[in-house]
Image (spheres, rainbow, N blue to C red):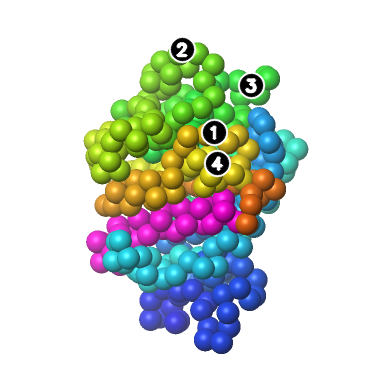
Amino acid sequence: MSNSDGPMGQRDIPGHPRYAGIATFALLPRIEDVPHADVAVLGIPFDAGTSYRPGARFGPAHIRECSRQLHPYHQTHDVHPFAVQQVADAGDLGVTPYDIAAAVSSIEFAASEYNERGTRLVVLGGDHTIALPLLRAVAKRNGPVAVIHFDAHLDTWDTHMGASLWHGSPFRRAAEEGLLDRTRCVHVGLRGGVYDKGELEADGVLGFQVIRADDFQAQSIADVVSRIRDRVGAGPVYLSVDIDVLDPAFAPGTGTPEPAGLTSRELFGAIRGLVGLDVVGADVVEVAPAYDHAGVTGLAAAHTAWEIIALMATGAAASGGLAR
Ligand code: MN
Ligand code: MN
C-alpha cells in the first residue's frame, strides 16, 4: 500500500513467510521508507544502568525477532493499529555504553526530535534508566505527564553506589525535575526489592500510588483498571512497562526477576482497559535475552509493545485518522 492510500502497513507478501528476511518490528516499514510516522518503534540498546544481571542491551534485537508473528487486526479494540496511524520501525539509537550521563543526554536529544516532528515513541529497551530522558522529551512537548508504571519495583530510589542515574532512579529524577504530574502517577504490579517502609512513603511524596501484584488476586482486572483510570484521569499519559512486572514464568529473561508477578493476560487486560487515554509515549524495558528461554520473554515484550500501539490507535481512530 502506498502512502497516498494511507499508512504503509506490514510487509506481508504472499509467498514470503513471516520468518524470512530482516526483522523490523512487526514487519513494519523502516522509518526512512515513510514520509511521516505517527508512531515510531525505537530500540535503545543501553544497559549500563543495571544493578544486577546485565544484558538488556540485546533487548531490542530480540524483541524484533519475536515480533514477526504480530498480525494487523486487534480483536479486542476492533482496530487495525497499522492502518489508522502510520507506524514505522526507527531502528536502534546508538548510545555509548561507557558514560551514563552522555547516553541519557543523547537519548533525550533524539527523542525530542521525534516528538517535535509529531512522532510518538514506543521504545524497546534497554534498561529502565532510559525512561528519564524519554520523560524529559515528552514533558518538553506536553508539560508534566501522568506515568503508569508497570514494574515489580519502585524505581524511585535515589543514588546507588554514588550514581544518581541508574535503572532504579528514573522516576525519582523525573519527579524532581518536574516532569511528572504528581497527582496522577501510579505503579502497577509492585512487589519486590524494598529495604524498608520509608521507601514506600518517599515514593508517595514523589507522586505515586501503588497497585500491588497481589491486588490482581484479590480484585478483577476491571477493578484494577478503574483504580488506574481514577488515578490518571484525563490528560497526557506516559506508559512505562518493565517486563519484570510479569512473573518469571512469563518473563524469565530480565535482569531482576521477582516471583509472584502478573500473568501476561493480566498485563494485557490492564493495558487494554486504558482505551481512550492520551498516550504520548511509552517504553517496554529490561528484556535481557541471555536469560530467556524459547523467546518467552521476547514474545511477551513484543506483544506488550503491540498492545500499546493498538491503544494509541484507538485514539487515532476516534479522532478520525492521524492524531497529533
Ligand atoms: Mn523492575
Ligand atoms: Mn524498572
Residue 297 on the magenta segment: yes
The structure residue drawn at horizontal position 65% and vertical position 71%, both measured from the top left corner, is 22
Comparing 241 with 101, the one in front is 241
Please provide percent x and percent y for residue 122. Answer: 48, 53
- Choose the circle earlier in sequence order: 2 or 4: 2
In the rendering, which numbered label is found on residue 258? 1
Callout 4 touching callout 1 (CB < 8 Å): yes
Label 1 Cα crowd, 10 Å radius (few <14 / some 14-19 / many 20+): many
Q: Which quadrant holds residue 203? A: top left
- Choose the circle earlier in sequence order: 4 or 1: 4
The residues bearing labels 2 and 4 have C-alpha atoms spaced at a distance of: 27 Å
The residues bearing labels 3 and 2 have C-alpha atoms spaced at a distance of: 16 Å
The structure residue drawn at horizontal position 43% and vertical position 78%, both measured from the top left corner, is 3
Judged left or right of residue 42, residue 142 is left
Q: Is residue 47 above or below residue 200?
A: below
In the rendered image, the quadrant that contains the N terminus is bottom left
The residues bearing labels 1 and 2 have C-alpha atoms spaced at a distance of: 21 Å
Q: Which residue is mark 3?
A: 160
Label 3 Cα crowd, 10 Å radius (few <14 / some 14-19 / many 20+): few
Label 2 Cα crowd, 10 Å radius (few <14 / some 14-19 / many 20+): few
Q: Amino acid at mark 2?
A: Gly
